Amino acid sequence: NAGVTQTPKFQVLKTGQSMTLQCAQDMNHNSMYWYRQDPGMGLRLIYYSASEGTTDKGEVPNGYNVSRLNKREFSLRLESAAPSQTSVYFCASSEGGTTHGDTQYFGPGTRLTVL
Amino acid sequence: QQPVQSPQAVILREGEDAVINCSSSKALYSVHWYRQKHGEAPVFLMILLKGGEQKGHEKISASFNEKKQQSSLYLTASQLSYSGTYFCGVGTDSNYQLIWGAGTKLIIKP
């Protein structure tokens, strides 16, 4: 049982390049999330998917797109990377999705630098 | 609006106690506590819900004051393994998606 996995672990991009961050979970969870973490700011929600087939914007969605490929996989795409998108990106999943008592399980993170 | 955590950082000796606070300007429905070690993912510690329900780590306790819109995490007889940054995430009546605090860095020295 691997939990939540993310690829790649590290990535360096040049301004304007595109890339997709991959996330998969093997816990049969309904909900999945993408966060970014910047120094001193905690976690900020980019997009989430409450269930397979649905996606919704979070707090900071500009510059990103997501795809819930199936129940297991949730990808985050940067179409034209900008230096402001330099951050650590975490994917998370939870069982229920639309309740307050849901525990979120986090992946190991992707450290992205945009030059 | 981001909840406010205090203190921002604290240094303790092994065996000492610590209290970490999380305050919100909005009415809260849930408070989630996580610990993150450097370079790692956040790990779940505890959930506190409006009405008193709690679930989480056996050796960690927390309180949730609904009227004051605050939660406190209590770490007693701290161990070296407690070191890390502690985050609170809050859910409000109108939004179950969590808004996270900036974190409290806890350093435990032997």
Image (cartoon, coloured by chain):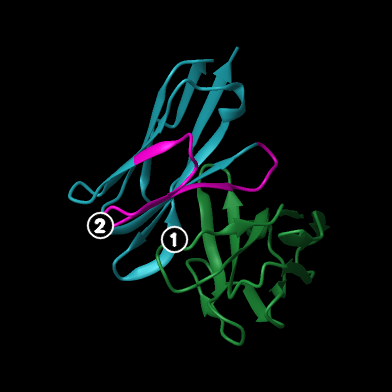
**Mark 1 belongs to chain:** B
> Crowdedness of circle 2 by 10 Å Cα count: few (<14), some, many (20+)?
few
Q: Which mark is residue B98?
A: 1
Q: Is residue B96 magenta?
A: no
Instruction: Say which element carries label 1.
Output: strand
Q: Residue at x 71, y 59 (%)?
A: A3
Q: Identify by letter the chain in cyan.
A: B
Q: Which amino acid type corresponds to the residue marked 2 in the rendered image?
A: Gly
Say whether disc 1 or disc 2 marks the residue closer to the N-terminus. Answer: 2
Q: Which amino acid type corresponds to the residue marked 1 in the rendered image?
A: Leu
Q: Is residue B91 above or below residue B74?
A: below
Q: x, y (%) of residue A6?
A: 76, 61
Q: Is residue B54 magenta?
A: yes
Q: Is residue B106 above or below residue A50?
A: above
Q: CA distance from mark 1 to mark 2?
A: 18 Å
Quarter holding residue B73: top left
Residue segment shown in magenta = B38-62
Q: Report the residue that reaches farthest toward the front.
A: B58
* Residues indicated by labels 1 and 2 sit on the same polypeptide chain: yes
Q: Residue at x 81, y 56 (%)?
A: A11
**Quick check: B103 left or right of A12?**
left
Q: x, y (%) of residue A15?
A: 76, 63
Q: Identify by letter the chain in green.
A: A
Q: Which residue is mark 2?
A: B51
